Amino acid sequence: MSLSTPIREPARESESMANEQEYVFKVRDFSAYYGDFRAIRDIDLDIPKNRITAFIGPSGCGKSTLLRCFNRMNDLIPGAHIDGKVEYHGVDLYDSRVDAVEVRRRIGMVFQKPNPFPKSIYENVAFGPKIAGYKGDMDELVESSLKRAAIWDEVKDKLKQPGTALSGGQQQRLCIARAIAVQPDVILMDEPCSALDPVATLKIEELMFELRAEYTILIVTHNMQQAARASDDTIFLTMGDDRAGYLVEKGATSDVFTNPTNQLTEDYVSGRFG
Amino acid sequence: MTSSATEAVEQAIMGRKRDWRSVAFELALLASLFIALGVLIWLMTDIFLRALPVFQERSLSDFLSGSMSSNPDRAGVGQALWGSLVLMVFVAILAIPIGIAAAVYLEEYAPDNFLTRLINTTVRNLAGVPAVVYGLLGIAVFVVLLKDWTGGPSIISGGFTLAIVVLPIVVITSAESLRAVPSSIREAGYGVGATKWEVTRSHVIPYAIPGILTGTILTIGRAFGETAPLLLVGAVTGGFAVAANATLVERLTGPYTALPTVIFSWSRQPRAEFRELTAAAIIVLLVLVLIINAIAIVLRNRYARKW
């Protein structure tokens, strides 16, 4: 992928096949547990760089769990543990020497419900860089982050006002700006538009296409149309009889939606199930 | 719509009756409210009327600055006010930081296992233990065991004892405020690469502080009226004098008294004048507790946060 790729045109599969595609994550034989309960099992997948990968599947199939394993956010849940391997640029994320805090600096996250800190818009964006020891011009970083999150024009005159006073869509873009400000490599989005109206949703999707040039984006979504129009690759998970989620199909979004190889996928994307 | 349909609907929905059971229930609730409120108002009026002569015959400042005296014309609550004030300073300095720190540990750091659940339950139970039991602890530990540091039955012993009385309440109210900070805020902090300490210090504690402060001030109000433990750890119920040139250490390790102790002491005096003085001291205590609670309410309303 190059910066000149027109916005909103998904990368073509042939292109990524031809070039040696660089992978950000390689997941091998991966299972995640909450206590004794296995939430996802035997996941194998590769996440290519500078693409938008969507995770779809019915409620409770473990999409969010899988996403939260990419930046070790699930470590924070008591009793959560994993089995298998997640490699991030070739490094095992769950190696005992890995500092999960450093991981989260490189792999940012945007959550389902907009969760700005009840502080000023400026402080929301500046918090991450500040604790990371950012030495440059903070005002400039805040401005550029807000600009890249396509919210600068709406907030530039009220940076001192609380982030919680913004509308839902603005709050979510503020959260994206906050994630961008720590200059991550990957952005994980856990149903970022589920609390937003269609206009705000479209803004976030456009934003994702712009951000794709610099970041690798993983997005969990309940909204099939969103996956279809706003992702390059799609991964479909579903739930087995043991209630553990497993991977059914992965591939270019256009293939998964128009030409699925698995009956389950076809049923799901055509709306017959889930 | 046909008229028969109208009739059918009319028959079905027009049978409005008085719901007597509901009315009776409402009246019972109202009566309960009046009983509770009535007793309180009666008590307050009675106390106020009894105290009136004291405030009419003497100036307020004379009563507020007077010392413990067997002469009812000169007796005042000056020493008691000073004692109560110093006690509250002790409570604030000791119980608030330790209580908040313990709550932060229990809520944010402690793993969820049998031991922490046991500790949590114990703290809740301790908050319900009668204060007089803490008084016994105060005698054993501060008055006897640590005599060399506290000066025996001194205001230091009283302050430490009161601090321990309110400590579990500070822990509980602080823990509740911390729990009210939604986990999405913590996740937001971790999501940008903050450590546990950074999330706790920069987000969780600041957002919980208004609630913690309100709860803490209310507990100080409670400590203000606590009598039993002070009687046990040596608050003086009779007259005493402190040399005008006494140093702070001498004042802190010497005899002391507090407002609730004085009320207790005066109420036991046989002379009628002391009954008026008791009522007057109660008024002073009530006004101070009301002021403390009002501060808590104002703070709560000003900083209340909706998530």
Image (spheres, rainbow, N blue to C red):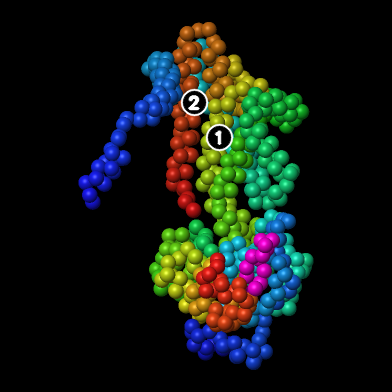
- Report the residue at 57% width, 75% height from top: A266
Q: Amino acid at mark 1?
A: Ile
- Report the residue at 44% width, 44% height from top: B301
Q: Is residue A242 magenta?
A: yes
Residue that carries the numbered disc 1 in the rendered image: B220
Image quarter hosting the N terminus of chain A: bottom right
Q: Secondary structure at mark 1?
A: helix
Q: Is A121 left, or right, of B241 in this rendering?
A: left
Secondary structure character of the magenta stretch overall: strand
Tell me if residue B246 comes above or below residue A229 in the rendering.
above
- The crowding category of the residue bearing disc 1, from other C-alpha atoms within 10 Å (few below 14, some 14 to 19, many at least 20), is many
Which subunit holds the residue at mark 1? B
Which subunit holds the residue at mark 2? B
Tell me if residue B17 comes above or below residue B110 in the rendering.
above
- Report the residue at 58% width, 69% height from top: A57
Residue A199 numbered tag: none
Pick the front one: B93 or A163: A163
Q: Is A244 left, or right, of A9 in this rendering?
A: right
Residue A179: tell me if it is visible. no
Cβ–Cβ below 8 Å for labels 1 and 2? no
Q: Position of residue A114 (x, y in %)?
A: 50, 63
Precedes in sequence: disc 1 or disc 2: 1
Give the spatial CA distance, label 1 vs label 2.
13 Å
Tell me if residue B289 comes above or below residue A117 in the rendering.
above
- Report the residue at 54% width, 10% height from top: B269
Residue B285 numbered tag: 2
* Magenta stretch, residue numbers: A235-248
